[in-house]
Image: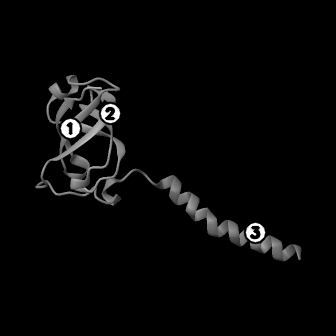
Amino acid sequence: MKKHVLAFALIGTLMIAPSFANAQAMAPNMDGMAGMAHDTKSADAQGVGVVKAIDTTQGTITLQHGAIASIGWPAMTMPFKVASADLLKVARVGDKVQFTLRPAGKDTMLTSVTLLQP
């Protein structure tokens, strides 16, 4: 009886271990996310969100935004490169904004930001 229990425990461990190894090796990859792959000819898209971070050295604004139906994106929080450094000065962390994106997968660019009244 003990041999069977030990054998089942060993088999179970061997079956589950690769799942944990895969989870550890995974890195964010937007290409695999539904709706995230777009060619550079896609039309600009509009969204509304909240500024979560501004990184002047990287030239990015992190937005927590709602779903953007026109390009099939779900609601999420992510950093966006800005088309112009001036966009980094429009809003502050915590501000609600309307924005325009030029979709291009991982190279999506934030092309405008407008501060919304609270």
Badge 3: how crowded within 10 Å, few (<14), some, or many (20+)?
few
1 or 2: tag closer to the N-terminus: 2
Q: x, y (%) of residue 101?
A: 19, 43
Q: Name which residue type carries label 3.
A: Ala
Name the residue at the front extreme: 118
What is the secondary structure assignment of the residue under circle 3? helix
Asked if disc 3 and disc 1 are in contact, CB closer than 8 Å, the reply is no
The Cα–Cα distance between marks 3 and 1, rounded to whole angstroms, is 54 Å
Give the answer, above or below, for where 73 lies relative to 46.
Answer: below
Q: In this view, does 31 lie to the left or right of 86?
A: right
Name the residue at the right extreme: 1
3 or 2: tag closer to the N-terminus: 3
Residue at position x 33%, y 25% in the image: 93
Badge 2: how crowded within 10 Å, few (<14), some, or many (20+)?
many
The Cα–Cα distance between marks 1 and 2, rounded to whole angstroms, is 10 Å
Residue at position x 28%, y 58% in the image: 35
Asked if disc 3 and disc 2 are in contact, CB closer than 8 Å, the reply is no
3 or 1: tag closer to the N-terminus: 3
What is the secondary structure assignment of the residue under circle 2? strand
Circle on res. 99:
1
Q: Name which residue type carries label 1.
A: Phe
Along the line of sight, which residue is nearer the eye, 64 or 58?
64
Quadrant (top left, top right, bottom left, bottom right) of the C terminus: top left
Give the answer, above or below, for where 61 lies relative to 40.
Answer: above
Circle on res. 50:
2
Give the answer, above or below, for where 117 lies relative to 46.
Answer: above
Name the residue carrying label 3. 9
| Disc nearest the viewer among 3 and 1 | 1
Residue at position x 55%, y 58% in the image: 21
Q: Name which residue type carries label 2.
A: Val
